[in-house]
Image (cartoon, helix red, strand yellow):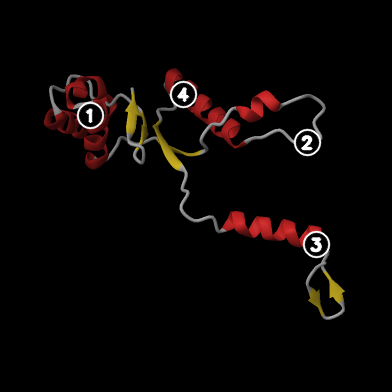
Amino acid sequence: MGFKFGANVIPSSIESKASARAANMFRWGKTLDVITLFHKPASASSARALTLLKQASANASQTATQDQASDHSAQNKIKRSEFELNVIEDAPTTDQLRSILEYVGAKRAGDLVHGAKDEADAVKRLKSDAESFRRPVVSFHAPWATL
């Protein structure tokens, strides 16, 4: 049956849908991973990375509906983690740069900031020329980074 509000009765099917929505709204403990793209709009490779990440984000949150004509059981079995996409067009802060260098390894400072020999040199070069920064994809939560 349903709840009674005066003379009105809410059917159980509506009541259960509302309960499910409320349970999803207040889900504790699970936060989405935030994937950060240090994006440079003028760069073709950065634009491709942005498109790919947007597609991956959309696909991770999509599931087939029961009323679709074809069989989607194979797609439904593929489990991808949902994530939040954060796109930043500015160079990273000093703290972000240090974190990224921790993830990729300090030996790769020159791969991240053109011409850098180590972490201190990377920070110095980034401050003097933001264009020397090679824009990675980063998860500060996981933590990982890819160039």
The residue at 13%/28% (across/down) is 121
The residue at 43%/19% (across/down) is 45
Please state which amino acid type lies under the numbered disc 3: Ser
In the rendered image, which quarter contains the N terminus?
Answer: bottom right
Q: Residues within 10 Å of mark 3 (few under 14, many from 20)?
A: few
Q: Position of residue 56 (x, y in %)?
A: 54, 29
Q: Using residue 49 as the reference point, say whether residue 91 is left or right of it.
A: left
Furthest-right residue in this view: 7
Residues 120 and 9: in front is 9
In the rendered structure, find residue 12 and report the number of the disc placed on it.
3
Q: Nearer the viewer, mark 4 or mark 2?
A: 2
Say whether marks 2 and 1 touch (CB < 8 Å): no
Q: Secondary structure at mark 2?
A: loop
Using the rendered view, name the quadrant where residue 72 is placed: top right
What residue is pinned by disc 4? 49
Q: Residues within 10 Å of mark 4 (few under 14, many from 20)?
A: some
Residues 38 and 59: in front is 59
Please state which amino acid type lies under the numbered disc 1: Asp
CA distance for labels 1 and 4: 23 Å
Q: Secondary structure at mark 1?
A: loop
The residue at 18%/19% (across/down) is 115
In the rendered image, which quarter contains the C terminus?
Answer: top left
Q: Earlier in the sequence, mark 4 or mark 3?
A: 3
Please state which amino acid type lies under the numbered disc 2: Gln
What residue is pinned by disc 2? 66
What residue is pinned by disc 1? 129
Count of marks placed on residues: 4
Q: Using residue 44 as the reference point, say whether residue 139 is left or right of it.
A: left
Using the rendered view, name the quadrant where residue 15 is placed: bottom right
